[in-house]
Image (cartoon, rainbow, N blue to C red):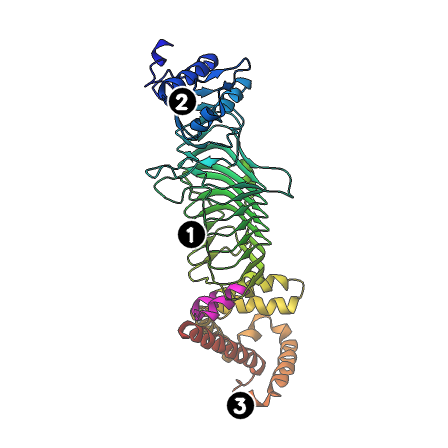
Amino acid sequence: MERYLDPDRILSGDKDENFYFFTEFRDLLVLLINTSFSNLPSPVRLDRNGRLKSTAEVFGILKTKELHINHVGFPGDWEGEEIIKILEHFGSIRFTQCQFYLKKIDLRSPRISFFECRFSATHEVLNVRLRKDHSYDDCIYQNCIFDGDLHCGIDDEKERTIIQHPLFSKCTFSKNLKLRNVELEGYLFDPDQRYPTTLHSITATNCIFQSGTYLNIKNLMDAAVFRSCIFKGKFEFKRNRIGALIINNCNFEKVADFHGSLFLRFKINKSIFSTFAGFENCIFGQTPLEEKKATKLARASRIVADFSYVTFLEHSSFRNAVFVTGLNIEKINTIEPPNFHNTQVSFEHTNRETFRIIKHALDAHGSHIEANKYFALEMKKFQKELSTNFWDSLIYKINGLTSDFGQSYLRATSCIIILSITFSLLSLGQENNILYKIYPPANDIIRFISSLFNGFASGFLPFKQFLRTDMEFISLIFYIMFGILIWQTIIAVKRLIKR
């Protein structure tokens, strides 16, 4: 301990890897005060309870002093709490590369900051005063590691804990970050992308974020859950890879940007976006193949990207988004049509109303050709809904097979060619009486049936002059099919070149 008695090295000098000497630390702290602060009118000493004892004038001077503490470990029992109580007398404190086993650091008076510190147990964030250094300190925790769960807030929903200063910059959270009934006046994470955050899961309940919220996480996240939160500043969730993002009953008053993120599970429910909401270049229902760290729960919940009772008061964009496992926007409310240009939506798990909304939005933006693609998908879904009605289902099935609901002129043209060849072969067979040579004893029955149907077909006067003799009924059927296919070909071509 003798080497720590040098006033120039006390508390701020390099120490052993773990410096846990409680009694020695208190003695060194008293020695530091009495030797470094030479203008004290009277010395400082410890009373029988281990607390600092001096005059009010001395404590007033200490309130103007700054203390740097390096490489000190704070135990999680009463000893650690007693040390924190002693530190309450200083004006500002900077903890550098310290290790904490304390559940919370309740320093209300000093301005404090933590740099490269490690919190080895479950930790609770309190509203403390920020030690501001214009060169680098602009948040409470800088480049710190949290090995256990991190909590911020209280359980009482009628009150909120107010955190006045920015909290985290380039920190690593090994477990869960939980915020409950908190109002953050500063940012939660540093918006500077040079100082990324490593975060595995975050849950925020009944919180207010006054400043911008920037969750640009560099690692693959397990989950992010926001319930009953208000984001008064910009919300940024860009280029993240996450197992599950759940947003319920939240209000986004400024821009909400999810650009380029990958979601395995995605659900927004009963939320309002007051300005621009961007989901461009996002992939829903998939995480990178080379990364398999998503939680089992998120993988088991591989469901449709769901927007239920979501209101977009201004513009929203899903440009270049991919919905691998389907999309549900059946219950959204929009003032302006969303932008779905170049969006890919899985057919299997997407409902018909979603395809209708996308089609309408694309039409509203003038992208009629792309809208026609979603019209075809809408019709295919409608065809499935008609499965109990045979004739309606048959009509839609034929329409889908012959022209893909007016999307494929090549398919309709191919059907015309096939019908033409078939009719030519039937005409050739009729000229050579092939039908009557198959089974001669049935010729009388064949003549009776053909005469009956041919007479019926001849009654359609507009077509009578075009019907082939002795093949009137077959000719009528083929002419009707030709008319339908020609019309579908025209529709498909018009949709292809429509401006």
Q: Residue at x 37, y 23 (%)?
A: 39
Q: Is residue 390 left or right of residue 115?
A: right
CB atoms at circles 3 and 1 under 8 Å apart?
no
Q: Amino acid at mark 2?
A: Leu
Q: Residue at x 43, y 59 (%)?
A: 319
Report x, y in % for residue 180: 58, 40
Tell me the element at label 3. Answer: loop
Identify which residue, 234 or 260, lies in the foreground.
234
Quadrant of the rendering where the N terminus is positioned: top left
Report x, y in % for residue 435: 56, 74
Magenta-drawn stretch contains 359 = yes
Q: Which residue is mark 3?
A: 465
Q: Does residue 23 show up?
A: yes
Q: Main secondary structure of the magenta part?
A: helix
> Which marked residue is nearer to the observer: mark 3 or mark 1?
1
Q: Which residue is mark 2?
A: 40
Q: Earlier in the sequence, mark 3 or mark 1?
A: 1
- Region in magenta: 357-373
Quadrant of the rendering where the C terminus is positioned: bottom left
Q: Which residue is mark 1?
A: 259
Tell me the element at label 1. Answer: loop
Q: Judge whether 456 appears above or below 75 on screen.
A: below
CB atoms at circles 2 and 1 under 8 Å apart?
no
Magenta-drawn stretch contains 100 = no
CB atoms at circles 3 and 2 under 8 Å apart?
no
Q: Judge whether 60 appears above or below 218 on screen.
A: above
Q: Does residue 293 show up?
A: no
Q: Earlier in the sequence, mark 2 or mark 1?
A: 2
Identify which residue, 397 or 92, lies in the foreground.
92
Identify which residue, 91 or 498, lies in the foreground.
91
* Gap in angstroms between the C-alphas marked 2 and 1: 58 Å
